[in-house]
């Protein structure tokens, strides 16, 4: 790796704490990723991205800002990337999946808060997230109560703009969301000095949806048996999608998907054809949260899909019938995002159908409902998920965990017991 210390210092980072973080990542990555066998060669690019996660990509962001562009941080798939790109912006999903920053979050927030929220705030205050430091401002959202309250505290540390996301999929909810998108558009135009005109937005949407299409192709390739790629590797691609250059990411993901299709044609896979196949569903797994995928795959099963915002909820929906005018495009973007079936909505029965459809399409034999500890929205919705999957004859294992390692033995035991029931 090049020496980026001057860049990090110029960004105002805490270099000593950051050294601790950087020392931990390669060990975790090596143990989790590089120990896997028979990985597709297309994963080399994503390994490279990880090796430069706080280096080369941050340098690109810094240079983009020097050229007059803006960098916007986000925590939720309800923030449309194409609006940001159309304002000469780069959209980066921010660090929120590491135990490293949880104690910093817990120094401020109650401990019985979702780890994603504690990790986000922890990174904001501990000076170790260069993506946040490189950003002009962050766009937060009113999806869940814990997040929206945290964003008020976050605003003391870094500029933040909070957009409202409705809780019901009604005409009034849609009108509110569309109005919020116009508010965000105006804020982005103020920051960048760039007018988001119809032609700029159309081009940006083509870039973003090109990325979603590539991810859909990768997703489709995972339906093959034997699985041509591990769930861990596919999860990593889904995580990197949030901060990599979208055009480069699309090209590399298409290459990877093509390689997986060739593997399938040659009947080649990373697991045996009789390995249990599982769909993961529930709270998002932000980088570097690989915990449950790793436990599942070390137990001899393979994860074949993620019904998650770091998964199908992110790339599953494309804008439909997009017209040329700005108004038509904004409307189509609103509809694309309201098609994300997050548990913050009530009712949210579409998600129940999505899980069954995804399990069928990926040839999964069972579903793991993954819940971040203290994430009430997904925990309570899991009751309906359980009833719905039972009606469809799909076995379900509900897990609740945080980013720590204390419960891995217990989780492993429960996962292995679940896999036994699938094998008989
Ligand atoms: S669209 S899932 S990314 S809000 S922060 S709800 S884990 S308690 S992240 Fe999300 Fe947008 Fe919905 Fe997706 Fe639970 Fe934690 Fe809240 Fe969370």
Image: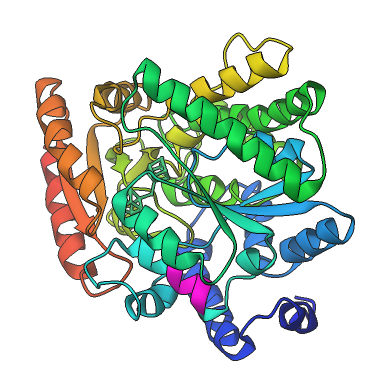
**Residue at 33 percent of width and 64 percent of height:** 115
Say if the magenta span includes residue 74: no
Which quadrant of the structure image shows residue 407?
bottom left
Which quadrant of the structure image shows residue 303?
top left
Considering depth in this image, is 316 or 90 the residue closer to the camera? 90
Which quadrant of the structure image shows residue 324?
top right
**Which quarter of the rendered picture does the N terminus lie within?**
bottom right
- Say left or right for 376 vs 141: left
Image position of 322 with respect to 381: above or below: above
- Say left or right for 355 vs 178: left
Q: Main secondary structure of the magenta part?
A: helix
Examine the rendering and report whether any part of residue 97 can be seen: no
- Say left or right for 284 vs 254: left
Q: Where is residue 409? Give x, y as percent.
A: 19, 69
Examine the rendering and report whether any part of residue 84 can be seen: yes
Q: Where is residue 14? Give x, y as percent.
A: 61, 85
Image position of 78 with respect to 179: above or below: below
- Say left or right for 324 vs 415: right
**Residue at 69 percent of width and 27 percent of height:** 205
**Which quarter of the rendered picture does the C terminus lie within?**
top left
Q: Where is residue 11? Give x, y as percent.
A: 72, 76
Highlighted range, magenta: 120-125
**Residue at 52 percent of width and 52 percent of height:** 236
| Residue furthest right as drawn | 67
**Residue at 80 percent of width and 59 percent of height:** 60
Considering depth in this image, is 359 or 244 the residue closer to the camera? 244
């Amino acid at each position: 790796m090049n020496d980026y210390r001057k860049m990090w210092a110029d960004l105002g980072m805490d270099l000593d704490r950051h050294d601790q973080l950087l020392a931990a990542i390669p060990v975790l990555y090596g143990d989790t990723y590089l120990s896997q066998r028979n990985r597709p060669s297309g994963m080399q690019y994503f390994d490279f991205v990880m090796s430069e996660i706080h280096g080369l990509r941050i340098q690109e962001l810094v240079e983009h800002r020097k050229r007059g562009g803006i960098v916007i941080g986000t925590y939720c798939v309800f923030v449309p990337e194409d609006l940001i790109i159309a304002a000469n912006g780069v959209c980066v999903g921010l660090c929120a999946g590491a135990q490293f920053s949880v104690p910093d979050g817990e120094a401020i927030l109650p401990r019985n808060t979702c780890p994603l929220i504690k990790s986000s705030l922890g990174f904001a205050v501990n000076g170790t997230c260069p993506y946040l430091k490189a950003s002009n401002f962050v766009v937060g959202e009113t999806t869940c109560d814990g997040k929206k309250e945290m964003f008020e505290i976050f605003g003391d540390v870094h500029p933040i703009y909070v957009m409202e996301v409705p809780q019901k999929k009604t005409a009034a909810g849609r009108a509110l969301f569309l109005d919020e998108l116009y508010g965000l558009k105006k804020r982005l135009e103020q920051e960048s000095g760039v007018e988001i005109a119809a032609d700029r937005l159309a081009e940006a949407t083509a870039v973003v949806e090109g990325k979603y299409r590539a991810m859909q192709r990768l997703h489709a390739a995972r339906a093959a048996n034997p699985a041509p790629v591990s769930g861990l590797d596919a999860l990593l691609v889904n995580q990197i999608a949030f901060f990599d250059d979208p055009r480069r990411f699309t090209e590399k993901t298409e290459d990877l998907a093509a390689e997986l299709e060739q593997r399938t044609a040659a009947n080649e896979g990373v697991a045996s054809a009789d390995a249990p196949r599982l769909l993961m569903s529930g709270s998002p797994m932000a980088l570097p949260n690989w915990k449950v995928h790793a436990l599942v795959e070390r137990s001899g099963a393979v994860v074949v899909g993620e019904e998650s915002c770091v998964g199908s909820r992110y790339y599953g929906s494309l804008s439909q019938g997009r017209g040329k005018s700005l108004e038509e495009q904004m409307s189509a973007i609103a509809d694309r995002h309201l098609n994300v079936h997050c548990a913050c909505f009530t009712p949210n029965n579409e998600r129940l159908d999505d899980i069954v459809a995804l399990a069928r399409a990926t040839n999964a034999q069972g579903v793991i409902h993954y819940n971040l500890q203290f994430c009430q929205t997904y925990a309570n919705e899991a009751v309906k998920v359980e009833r719905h999957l039972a009606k469809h004859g799909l076995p379900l294992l509900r897990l609740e965990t945080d980013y720590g390692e204390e419960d891995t033995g217990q989780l492993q035991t429960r996962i292995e017991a679940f896999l036994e029931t699938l094998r008989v």
